Amino acid sequence: MAIQESARKDDVLYSTVVQLGEMLRGGRITSMDLTLSYIERIKQVDPKLNAFITVTEGLAVQQAERADKELQGGSYLGPLHGIPYGAKDLLATKGIPTTWGSKIFAKQVFDFDSTVISRLRDAGAVLLGKLNMIELAGGTGYKFGSASATGATHNPWDLSRWAGGSSSGAGAAVAAGLVGFAIGSETWGSIVTPSAFCGVTGLRPSYGRVSRHGAMANSWTMDKIGPMARSAEDCRLVLEAINGTDPQDPTVRSSWRFTARQKPARIGVLNEGPSGISQLVADAIDVLKKNGHDVRPCKLPDLPYESVAATIQRAEACSAFWPLIRDGRLQELSDEGLKTSFAAGLNIRAIDYIQANRMRVQIESAMKGLHALFDVIVAPTLPVIANKLEDDLDKVFGSISDPLGAMGNVAGLPCVSVPCGFSNRMPVGMQILGAYGNEDDVLSVGMDYQKSTDWHKQRPPL
């Protein structure tokens, strides 16, 4: 039986992973109650949002029943045991459609689970369904937020605005209280953008931290899988469950468990021009200063971050989706921008790709030098708020630069985006970027900030 009383139910469904775990272990709620309540809310709210592609109600009920038996029998699998979640629809799920956000793959069903799904199952988490995404995770570039087989995901804070891409369903589902947490992926901005737009916390792990076995490939040397949740602490718990070595993905070389910083961090602040968003981030930085961190201005080395990221990502995406290109199926894609960007990507020469990767080595070296001076670097996640659904993304993002996002993804650096306020009643995010392999610093600073603020506890007016 689902949780009763509307006000209490909302409080429970918007609880953090930490709080939900305490309720489950204390017997104040069952996984079945929680699961049925989330499913009920999905049925009520998701028609407005379009965050889900597939709701796995039967599987969720089955997994919740098992979790309750285990918990009641004293078999505790960890902090995610019994907690419902959603997964971006590029992760293979045995016997369940995995569409990659595309009509071309609408009937695609794998006979195995991706490593991330398997590890969450082993941790006792309950899969509520597969979440909407930009078609082929954006491929080589797209023009509108509706670039998906099932259309755009609406932002819970304003249904006329976009939830962000490409992990749009994950951002909206967490923000709207449809899941306890979600799994997204990022090649360049696909976790942090919907996190900032929807007012949730998103963690992009270091490259090679989480196995990508069973995940759709977009860019082999830039793709990363990570959690989106209500808090940095939630993201930490999810990352602990899904990270680690996997013989199916040789890029994952070690396992990780969180170790909190024991002393204040050296924080570098990127210089930003005056704007409402920059002021909100400046206010957030003041919070970090008051908490005792050493905050100083910093400047990125002058390198072509965005052109390097674009060259590598587009060339690798054309390789990953070569069968579609070879078979003349680009015209079946949902977005004109996707069709033309793939065509343009084919013009990238081998020498350009090789030179970009040589420059990547210089970028990685420069960032090691910068991180010798600063433990983390902070800046606005994006200099804009969520755009209108009908807006041309070339115009929205074409006039802004994203050197930190490009550099972070080219070098495979960890980053967390945390909510830090509102501009025109829409959420704004601050990104906290760390050295390669150093999720500890990124999460420690994010958790410290959220202990002193409540932006991450705000709920959209649904």
Image (cartoon, rainbow, N blue to C red):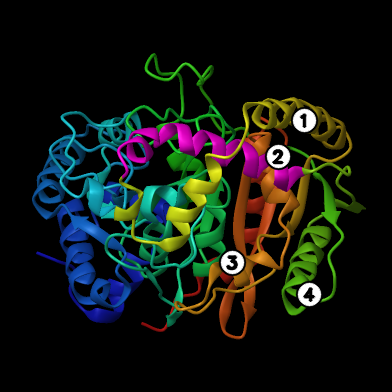
Amino acid type of the residue that numbered disc 3 sits on in the rendered structure? Asp
Whole-percent x and y of residue 124? 26, 38
Whole-percent x and y of residue 305? 75, 43
Is 217 placed left or right of 443 in the picture? left
Q: Is residue 107 magenta?
A: no
Label located before the other in sequence (2 or 1): 2
Amino acid type of the residue that numbered disc 2 sits on in the rendered structure? Val
Residue shown at 43%/62% (left/top)?
336
Circle 2: is it few (<14), some (14-19), or many (20+) Cα within 10 Å? many
Look at the numbered disc 4 and give the secondary structure of its residue: helix
Up-down: is 59 above or below 429?
Answer: above
Kindly indicate the quadrant of the structure image that contains residue 462.
bottom left
Label located before the other in sequence (3 or 1): 1
Dot 2 corresponds to which residue? 308
Residue contact between numbered discs 3 and 4, judged by CB atoms under 8 Å:
no
Up-down: is 212 above or below 196?
Answer: above
Is 263 placed left or right of 87 in the picture? right
Look at the numbered disc 3 and give the secondary structure of its residue: helix
Label located before the other in sequence (4 or 2): 4
Q: Is residue 327 magenta?
A: yes
Q: Which residues are magenta?
A: 305-328
- Of 243 and 343, nearer the camera is 343
Residue shown at 61%/37% (left/top)?
348
Amino acid type of the residue that numbered disc 4 sits on in the rendered structure? Gln
Residue contact between numbered discs 2 and 3, judged by CB atoms under 8 Å:
no
Look at the numbered disc 2 and give the secondary structure of its residue: helix
Circle 4: is it few (<14), some (14-19), or many (20+) Cα within 10 Å? some
